[in-house]
Amino acid sequence: AIQMTQSPSSLSASVGDRVTITCRASQDIRSDLGWYQQRPGKAPNLLIYAASNLHSGVPSRFSGSGSGTDFTLTISSLQPEDFATYYCLQDYSYPLTFGQGTKLEIK
Amino acid sequence: QLQLQESGPGLVKPSETLSLTCTVSGDSISSNTCYWNWIRQLPGKGLEWLGSIHYSGSTHFSPSLGSRVTISVDTSKNQFSLKVTSLTAADTAVYYCVRRYRVRQGVYHMDVWGRGTTVTVSS
C-alpha cells in the first residue's frame, strides 16, 4: 500500500497567517491527491481534488499544489473557521490511503 | 442534493458481526461515475479507508481488515452495506459512508459524506 506522510502533525497559527501543510507519498501518485478538512465532531469536507483543483464552494484562500510524491495545501490567510484537522488522501491506487492528519490550532 | 445516511447498531458485542447500511437519497446509486465507500475513524485517530463498491458489484477492500470486511449494494433500495465480522474493541470507531465521484477520466474525489455513526464494541 502507498504510505502518505503528512507534516507537521500539528501547527499553531494566528488568524491572518499563511500556513502550508505538506504530504509526501511513498511512490509516484501523479496528481491523484485530495485534501480534506475535518472540524471536531463532524464528517470531513472535500477542499481540493486532483492536487490543485478547488472543490465547488470552497473559499479561494485554500490552494493545493504538487505532483508525483510531494504535495502542499496552503491557506493564504487563516480565518477562525479554518482551525481544524486536515488530511490528504491518495486515490491513485487501491487501497486508498490517508495521511495521518495535521491539527491546526489557534496560537 | 445527494445525501448519505448511515444506520445500524451503536453497540455490538465482541466476536459478533457489525452490519451498517448507507441510504443514498437525492440521486441514484446506479450511476456509472460513482463508487460507494466506507471509511472509519478510531477514537482520537485519523481516517481509515475500508473499502468501496460500484453499483455493478465491483469491490475493493483494504488489506488491513483482511477477509473480515464485505460490502454489498442493493440498487432496488438505493443502499449499500458494510459487514465486519469477528469484532474486537479495536473496531470501535465512527463509520462514514462516502461517495467517490469520477469527475472526469482518471480524476476522482470524495465529495459527499454521511454524518457518521458511532459503533462501540463492548460486552
Image: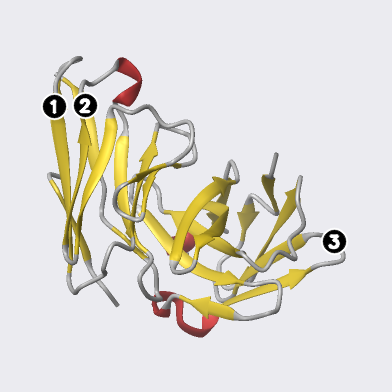
Residue A58 vs B6, above or below: the answer is above
Q: Amino acid at mark 3?
A: Lys
Residue placed under numbered mark 3 in the picture: B77
Classify residue A80 by image quadrant. Answer: top left
Q: Residue at x 52, y 78 (%)?
A: B60
Q: Chain of mark 1?
A: A
In the picture, measured across the screen, residue B46 lies left or right of residue B116, that is: left
Tag shown at residue A12: 1
Residue placed under numbered mark 2 in the picture: A105
Observer able to see residue B92: no
Whether label 1 touches label 2, CB < 8 Å: yes
Find residue B74 and report its horizontal and vertical position in percent: 79, 69
Residue B92 vs A42, above or below: the answer is below
Q: Chain of mark 2?
A: A
Instruction: Report, in whole angstroms, how far the alpha carbon at label 1 lies from the one at label 2.
Output: 5 Å
Residue B60 vs A89, above or below: the answer is below
Find residue B30 and report its horizontal and vertical position in percent: 75, 66
In the picture, measured across the screen, residue A106 lies left or right of residue B102, that is: left
Instruction: Pick whichever, A8 or B117, lies toward us.
Output: A8
Secondary structure under tag 2 reads: strand
Q: Amino acid at mark 1?
A: Ser
Residue A36 vs B33, above or below: the answer is above
Q: Quadrant of the C terminus of chain A?
A: top left
Find residue B46 and report its horizontal and vertical position in percent: 34, 51
Secondary structure under tag 1 reads: strand
Q: Amino acid at mark 2?
A: Glu
Tag shown at residue A62: none
Q: Chain of mark 3?
A: B
Instruction: Pick whichever, B35 or B113, lies toward us.
Output: B35
Q: Residue at x 17, y 42 (%)?
A: A21
